[in-house]
Image (cartoon, rainbow, N blue to C red):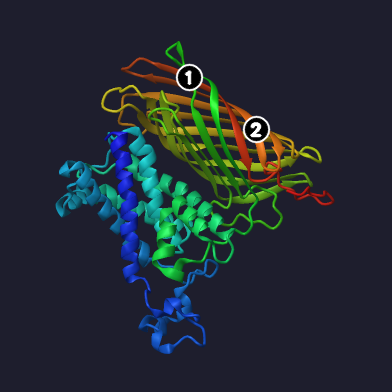
Amino acid sequence: MDAGLMIKKFKWVGILTLVLFASGKVFAEDDPRTSSTTAPGDPNYPAAMATPREKWKGASKRVLDWESRSGRSYFIPALEIPSFILLLNLADRGIYGNDVYGTTYHTFEDHVKNGPWRVDQDDFLTNQAFHPYQGTIYFGFARSAGLTFWESLLYTSAGSYLWETAGETGPPSINDQVASGIGGSFFGEELFRMANLSLERGGARPGFWRELGAAFISPPIGLNRLAFGDRFKTVLPSRNPATFANLSGGASIDSKVTDQGVTSTKGNEATADFSLAYGLPGKPGYRYIRPFDYFHFETNANTSRGNAFENIMTRGFLLGDRYESGDSFRGIWGLYGSYDYISPQIFRVSSTAASIGTTAQWWLSRKIALQGSALAGPGFGAAGNIAVQGDRDYHYGATAQGLLALRLIFGKIAMLDATGREYYISDVGSPDTRGHERIARGNLSFLVRIFGRHAVGIQYVITSRDASHSNIPDGHQRSETVYLAYNFLGDSHFGAVEWRDNVEEDEK
């Protein structure tokens, strides 16, 4: 299905979210107790207002407590996820007809019993961007109801399985199960953490704009906070992580593509970038005991025709430990989960992966710090040219990938940032023609702080593709762009974490 129709489809998703909210209000506690100055568990709470369930289990269980986990619900997301799938299926029937979405009990039963599970033929944007985002909706319903990351991942995988077997008439899709169930969970946890961080910084009663912002970042959070009153109003405690956010806007000043040895110049385009590093190593007292207590999220949008979102790149710390050396080095190492989507106009790559790696900071001098991450591991991904090659314009397969990211921070003056990524999409686990895709991406930027949290910078991005297949010509492509941008920084220290004794930290 084409991208225009998919955009229309996700407008329907927004409408369906409102429908679910309205439905939630029906079985939320919409009674006089919601406006009472006393709460369940308070000695002055009128006993006559307590429901039989409150009398039996105790009213304190009805408000989510993230530390004790009292008040969590396994039932509510188990109802919300199928309801969302049902309404999405009905909306798809209205938009696209019954050929793909006219499912029945018999098609569901046949998919469960017989499959066959296969790699589908949907377009790249649908499979590698929209399906992971659909997974974040399943994940957000479970997570915002008080479930842990791992429990929410199981709910997300179950939701993806239900969509694959009951949401479409075609055979269930292996790649969608990975992208929605696993990639959607990695992506969804970062959205959940960012939404909660915004709410937490709003104090005990976040204002309207913070509530709206959190709902925009993760719609299920906004839905459950509105639909169930105080039940899910409690914000996940972040435990005060060291963070660094950067929001930038600018324009390309030089941009060109090389395709099979022929180089052409692209027109200038406006661009906007957002990145957030959450849980940077070295913060005194901060512990890594929950998945994604450290993560790095970045995304880019631009005015390029037909390619509004060029990338969404995420990586998060799943499990591992801290380490240190002397008084100048702090780090974490262990297992990371990642979801990446990169589409520089003429080709694209996306993967969901698990990697072994490390993230650390090293104070080279009193004012100069080096931060970095190094990751490598296997995954399942897709890559290809935008020119159609057979039934599908991209290639699936088991993926090997690596990342090296370094950030050199010169006090409050400037920052040099360099990141390199490489993906090797093999023919292992692929139903396509034998072959492989090797895609590399490099990013080099230099920022200078002007005053406060305001900085200007220049950035160079290069992405290259080398592909070899048994029955199509080899592909050699490259995209290069230079940007000038204004940057609004999360702090004036460019995210450097201070833990050293007898070093006075400048005012941020």
Per the rendering, the mark at residue 275 is: none
Q: Provide residue 30's location: percent of width, then percent of height.
A: 37, 74
- Which class describes the residues within 10 Å of circle 1: few (<14), some (14-19), or many (20+)? many
**Three-letter amino acid code of the residue under disc 2:** Val
Q: Position of residue 253 (x, y in %)?
A: 55, 22
Which SS class for mark 1? strand
Quadrant where the N terminus sits is: top left
* Observer able to see residue 178: no
Q: How crowded is mark 2: few (under 14 residues within 10 Å), some or many (20 or more)?
A: some
**Rendered residue at 38%/26% (across/down):** 384
In terms of secondary structure, where does tag 2 sit? strand
460 vs 52, left or right, is right
Residue nearer the viewer, 178 or 95: 95
Q: Which of marks 2 and 1 is nearer the N terminus?
A: 2
Which image quarter: residue 467? top left
Please determine whether, in this image, residue 305 is positioned above or below residue 212. Answer: above
Check the image and name the residue furthest to the top: 262
Which numbered marker is on residue 478?
A: 1
The residue that mark 2 highlights is: 456
Q: Is residue 282 visible?
A: yes
**Where 260 sits versus 49, above or below?**
above
Compared with residue 89, is residue 54 higher up or lower down, i.e. above or below?
below
Q: Where is residue 239 in the image (x, y as percent from the top left)?
A: 62, 59
Q: In this view, does 393 lie to the left or right of 240?
A: left
